[in-house]
Amino acid sequence: MDGLGGVAVLEGALSVLTGIAVFFILPDSPESAGWLNQREKQFLRRRLDQDSGTREGRVASTEKFQLKYLIAALTDWKIWFTVLVYWGSTIPNYAMTFTAPQIITYLGYTAAEAQLLTVPIYAGALISTVVCAILADKYKTRWPFVVFPYTAAAIGFIGLLATPQARLPGLTYAFLFPVTAGCYPGVITVVSWAANNLAPSSKRAAGLGLSLTLANAGGIVGSNIFLAKEAPRYWTGYGLCMAFISIAIASALFLRFTLKRENHKRDQYSEEEIREKYTEEQLLEMGDASPLYRYVY
């Protein structure tokens, strides 16, 4: 192993080996988990059945992996729009993780002080994330807890661009709070939003894996857009963060209106009409395409 390249190979190899091991070690269902007793298996099965559908319709939760559900996930337009929403969070988050201490040092603080001053910023992000998660579940909706926090983050970036940092260090520092508090809730909210609208479980697993992989690819962008030669203004970094947040807001609003319209279409048919046309097994296999299924927006 030679230098940092060897470290990267070791870290990557561990991740790959862990992923392979999980395929054989992780149980596919409560029934195959040998450490659970019968009562615990029944409890988890009922819980999975309840979580697999909506009030209007249940979907299959016991099916084995089938290629058709992987293809359904890869071709589902909703997943690709959730990736755009994810990037409104992951790209600024990765960027600010590396850059926030540097921004603070330009305000006249030492490197050690700058590291300490990032703690309140991320404490605010933690509080914001928990509050948004609780409210999103309470009101059973997702889009407001993406759009409004992202809007706050965009305002923070505008403030950072517009503030003369050397003369107003306190104001510059203050604008870092809405940036992190606005970006961080996006990841948690979008994960649940994507999961709510993918069924059955094989499609949900494949879809979440795809969307999270592409979402975290935002780190490649975020870690390279704050250019040292532009310090302390960082026009490119702030501008691109605002651009990705704007795209994320537009994508979230598009998802909201499209999913609401689809629910309205399905509301035009009564459950009796639907069950006359399809068997229970067909409705379960259709997953989120079932006319009894209702999307969360």
Image: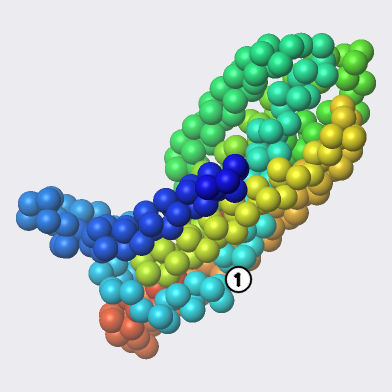
- The amino acid at mark 1 is Trp
- Percent x, y for residue 227? 84, 39
Q: Nearer the viewer, residue 71 or 253?
A: 71
Q: Residue at x 45, y 75 (%)?
A: 70
Crowding at dot 1, Cα within 10 Å, few <14 / some 14-19 / many 20+, comes out as few
- Percent x, y for residue 91? 69, 46
Q: Residue at x 12, y 56 (%)?
A: 34
Q: Residue at x 54, y 73 (%)?
A: 74
Horizontally, residue 163 falls left or right of residue 87, namely: right
Q: Quadrant of residue 272?
A: bottom left
- Percent x, y for residue 213? 55, 58
Tell me the SS state at disc 1. Answer: helix
The reply to whether residue 149 is visible in this rendering is no
The reply to whether residue 1 is visible in this rendering is yes
Q: Is residue 111 above or below residue 36?
A: above
Q: Residue furthest bottom?
A: 277
- Percent x, y for residue 122? 60, 25
The residue that label 1 is drawn on is 77
Q: Residue furthest front?
A: 2
Horizontally, residue 6 falls left or right of residue 92, namely: left
Q: Is residue 280 above or below residue 125?
A: below
Q: Nearer the viewer, residue 7 or 86?
A: 7
Q: Residue furthest left?
A: 38
Q: Quadrant of residue 183?
A: top right
Q: Quadrant of residue 38?
A: bottom left
